[in-house]
């Protein structure tokens, strides 16, 4: 009798534990489902918003509506219509050898349509306003002909600071995390074959240019891995490349061998010689411009508080065969 009672009590305790465990698992699954659903909703919005004012797309939009294509089919069409130029060539003599200083450079256009660009620009304006109110940790207002910047994901110095801190990532300084919309952008860049899944960005800097602002010649710090990329918004401008690019006493830039226009909604990917042999700069912009530069930190340089973002793990490119567009122009330096 006692034995049967003990067994029934044990069975009840086990059943109770199983019930509690099942509820816990179900609750966690619901949390994950909500998180993924939230992410997919944002990605759907970014993928599906169409610019109704773009007359050149009206027939195409109507075709999509008539055929009731799925989200995956619409995304497939968008991906295969991205224009990709990877065959940049400009030959210069570097350390006694003829080198293609643009090797590794890529330009992807039509990555973001007009409606998506507007949404991103609106978000940047919102962040700029927060920065001006002192609500962000790393927001800097332009001085002289510089540009305003906002850092997310990590703090870094462009050059040695007055306090003696070296250029690069500041391990013990805190900063605001990547805004959710920026994480959605990163996912697209990887899924749409713009950035490799081996180098998913975990930080970024927002650049806000007023007319006449610029960025001087530089190499990006090696606390950040290659490749990295810059997405352009609001207005087109040129970026200059050159192994001998420098600032003259007059403030003008010289040694810029190759000038590349950056269309709005495009993504410039810098890797190889295009990142580490040729310096690059943005001359004075003719009108207001915004850009977001996405980078991945070297793991050995992570801030002490840094934790990898779950939404940015395990992203894989969509299984589409893509082709580069554009013809290479082999250009030799006059020197």
Image: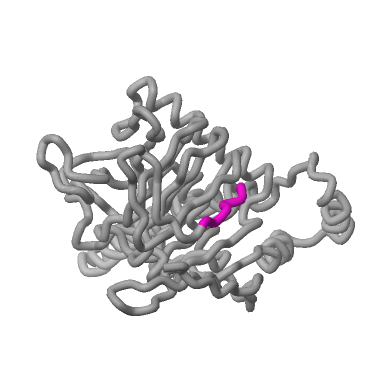
- Residue found 57% across the figure and 43% down from its top: 233
Residue 125 at x, y percent in the picture: 51, 30
Where residue 138 sits, quadrant-wise, is: top left
Where residue 323 sits, quadrant-wise, is: bottom right
Hey, which residue is sitting farthest left in the picture?
164
Residue 20 at x, y percent in the picture: 35, 54
Determine whether 195 is above or below 167 in the image: below
On whether residue 218 falls in the magenta region, the answer is: no
Q: Is residue 16 left or right of residue 84?
A: left
Q: Quadrant of the C terminus?
A: bottom left
Q: Is residue 197 left or right of residue 327?
A: left
Residue 37 at x, y percent in the picture: 55, 51
Residue 33 at x, y percent in the picture: 51, 54
Instruction: Give whichever of 99, 147 is nearer the camera.
Output: 99
The span picked out in magenta is: 259-264
Most common secondary structure along the magenta stretch: strand
- Residue found 69% across the figure and 61% down from its top: 78
Q: Quadrant of the N terminus?
A: bottom left
- Residue found 22% across the figure and 51% down from its top: 168
């Amino acid at each position: 009798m006692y034995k049967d009672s003990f067994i029934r009590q044990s069975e009840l305790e086990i059943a109770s534990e199983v019930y509690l465990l099942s509820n816990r698992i179900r609750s966690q699954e619901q949390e994950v489902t909500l998180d993924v659903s939230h992410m997919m909703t944002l990605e759907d919005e970014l993928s599906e918003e169409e610019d109704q004012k773009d007359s050149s797309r009206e027939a195409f939009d109507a075709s999509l509506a008539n055929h009731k294509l799925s989200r995956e089919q619409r995304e497939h069409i968008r991906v295969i219509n991205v224009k990709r130029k990877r065959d940049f060539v400009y030959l210069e003599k570097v350390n006694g050898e003829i080198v293609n200083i643009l090797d590794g450079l890529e330009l992807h256009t039509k990555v973001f349509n007009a409606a998506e660009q507007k949404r991103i620009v609106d978000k940047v304006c919102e962040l700029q306003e927060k920065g001006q109110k002192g609500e962000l940790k790393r927001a800097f207002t332009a001085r002289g002909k510089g540009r305003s910047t906002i850092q997310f994901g990590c703090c870094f110095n462009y050059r040695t600071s007055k306090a003696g801190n070296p250029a690069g990532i500041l391990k013990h300084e805190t900063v605001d995390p990547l805004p959710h919309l920026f994480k959605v952008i990163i996912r697209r860049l990887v899924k749409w074959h713009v950035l490799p899944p081996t180098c998913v960005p975990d930080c970024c800097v927002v650049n806000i240019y007023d007319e006449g602002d610029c960025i001087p010649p530089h190499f990006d710090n090696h606390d950040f891995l290659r490749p990295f990329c810059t997405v352009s918004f609001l207005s087109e401008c040129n970026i200059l490349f050159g192994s001998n690019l420098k600032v003259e006493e007059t403030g003008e830039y010289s040694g810029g061998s190759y000038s590349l226009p950056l269309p709005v909604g495009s993504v410039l990917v810098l890797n190889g010689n295009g990142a580490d042999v040729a310096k690059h700069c943005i001359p004075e912009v003719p009108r207001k411009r915004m850009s977001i530069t996405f980078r991945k930190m070297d793991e050995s340089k992570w801030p002490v508080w840094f934790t990898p973002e779950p939404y940015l793990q395990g992203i894989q490119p969509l299984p589409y065969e893509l082709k580069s567009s554009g013809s290479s122009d082999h250009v030799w330096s006059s020197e």
